[in-house]
Amino acid sequence: QVQLVESGGGLVQAGGSLRLSCIVSGRTFNEYRSAWFRQAPGKAREFVATFLWSGSTVYADSVKGRFTISRDNAKNTVYLQMNNLKPEDTAVYSCAAELGGRTGYDYWGQGTQVTVSS
């Protein structure tokens, strides 16, 4: 069973920074690829950032240049460093994992709230 647990959310002023963490258990780092998504109130969930199987990273245009996805393989943890936060970044942020040989993210964390005040 794969489990993902996020942490690091909170309330921050516009222009501030936060770093989200996602601890993955049940698989080793080379058995999955991970991503971050977010969902704002009343809106559909949207993609934020991901690792490709090659190790390259992909970002949504809305966060490019401000957010950075990274990982610590020894800790089986994925991070999302968020800088220059804007009120429109307010959302519940969730990490997700796609296992090798499968298509789509089958495993999700419970989410962590990020609120950016203006």
Image (cartoon, grey):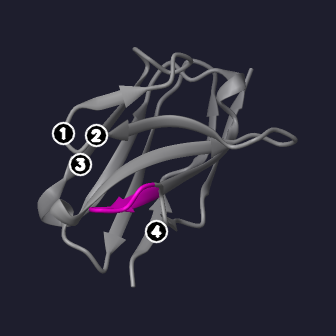
**Disc number at residue 52?**
2
Question: Which circle's residue, 4 or 3, is located before the other in the chain?
Answer: 4
Disc 4 marks which amino acid?
Val
Q: Which residue is mark 4?
A: 5
Quarter of the view holding residue 2:
bottom left
Element on which disc 4 rests: strand
Real-space CA distance between mark 1 and mark 2, rounded to the nearest whole angstrom? 5 Å
Residue 100 painted magenta: yes
Real-space CA distance between mark 2 and mark 3, rounded to the nearest whole angstrom? 13 Å
Disc 3 marks which amino acid?
Arg
Question: Which circle's residue, 1 or 3, is located before the other in the chain?
Answer: 1
Closest to the camera, between mark 1 and mark 4, is 1
| Residue at (81% x, 38% y) in the render | 43
Q: Is residue 16 above or below residue 96?
A: above
Real-space CA distance between mark 1 and mark 3, rounded to the nearest whole angstrom? 10 Å
Q: Which residues are magenta?
A: 96-103
Q: Is residue 67 above or below residue 42?
A: above
Q: Which residue is mark 1?
A: 55
Element on which disc 1 rests: loop
Closest to the camera, between mark 4 and mark 2, is 2
